[in-house]
Amino acid sequence: MARRKKPQPNPKAGLSWRESHGITNPLQRAFLAALSIVGQPTAAAKISHVSKQTHYNWLNAIDKDGNATADATRYAGAAREAVEQAGDNLEHHVWKMAMDAKKPNLVAAIFLLKGIRPEKYRERFVAEHTGPKGGPIETNTNVAIVNLEELRSPERLQAVTALIRSTGLENNFPELFKGSDSGNGNGSGNGKH
């Protein structure tokens, strides 16, 4: 039984980018032909025998004023079109897998539907945080800066400890509430500090 040959990249594929962008450099044409098939620079470099860095150099060529050269602009447009063509080819291949009469591929079909009709089939996650009746969330921030040296007067100490207790922040001031007796409210337990 004869083995089927692995399909080889067609160097004539992607004529549109050659014609519309005027790419004449044979190395650029080889790289772009490969890119139009595989859609990925690393794989295109292996197929075309042109380094990926050379491809990036062509994309980023600048003139003495720091602007992209006309060649770089043309090449970048051709590269975008080659990647688009590879995407179209892959999409067609996935479509054929999804629609196979003998063994349709459901996963391929799902991905195609997500791409073709994202408004209906895309994955959605919506998290909304609202307050009562859909209004804004109300937040309160209480900040207490306490210089314990200024609390020497029993009246001040009592006022500050009452304030802290009303906000539920006693645990944030252990030195103030150490040995506290909840009945006297002065925070010291014995009236002395």
Image (cartoon, rainbow, N blue to C red):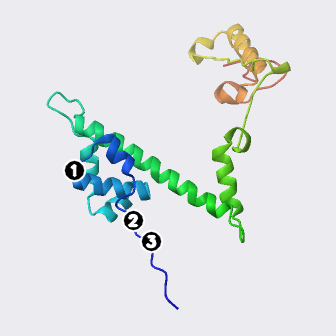
Camera-nearest residue between 100 and 54: 100
With respect to residue 190, does 110 lie above or below?
A: below
Residue 68 at x, y = what percent?
24, 33
Residue at x-position 73% and y-position 13%? 158
Residue 141 at x, y = what percent?
67, 18
Q: What's under tag 3, amino acid-wise?
A: Pro
- Find disc 3 in the rendering and name its residue: 7
Q: Relative to 63, is 174 on the left or the right?
A: right
Q: Assess whether mark 1 and mark 3 are in contact (beta carbons under 8 angstroms).
A: no
Q: Residues within 10 Å of mark 1 (few under 14, many from 20)?
A: few
- Find disc 2 in the rendering and name its residue: 9
SS category of the residue bearing label 2: loop
Q: Earlier in the sequence, mark 1 or mark 2?
A: 2
Count the marks.
3
With respect to residue 18, does 100 lie above or below?
A: below
Camera-nearest residue between 100 and 136: 100
SS category of the residue bearing label 3: loop
- Distance in Å between CA atoms under marks 3 and 1: 26 Å
Q: Assess whether mark 3 and mark 2 are in contact (beta carbons under 8 angstroms).
A: yes
Q: Residues within 10 Å of mark 2 (few under 14, many from 20)?
A: some
Q: Is residue 191 visible?
A: no
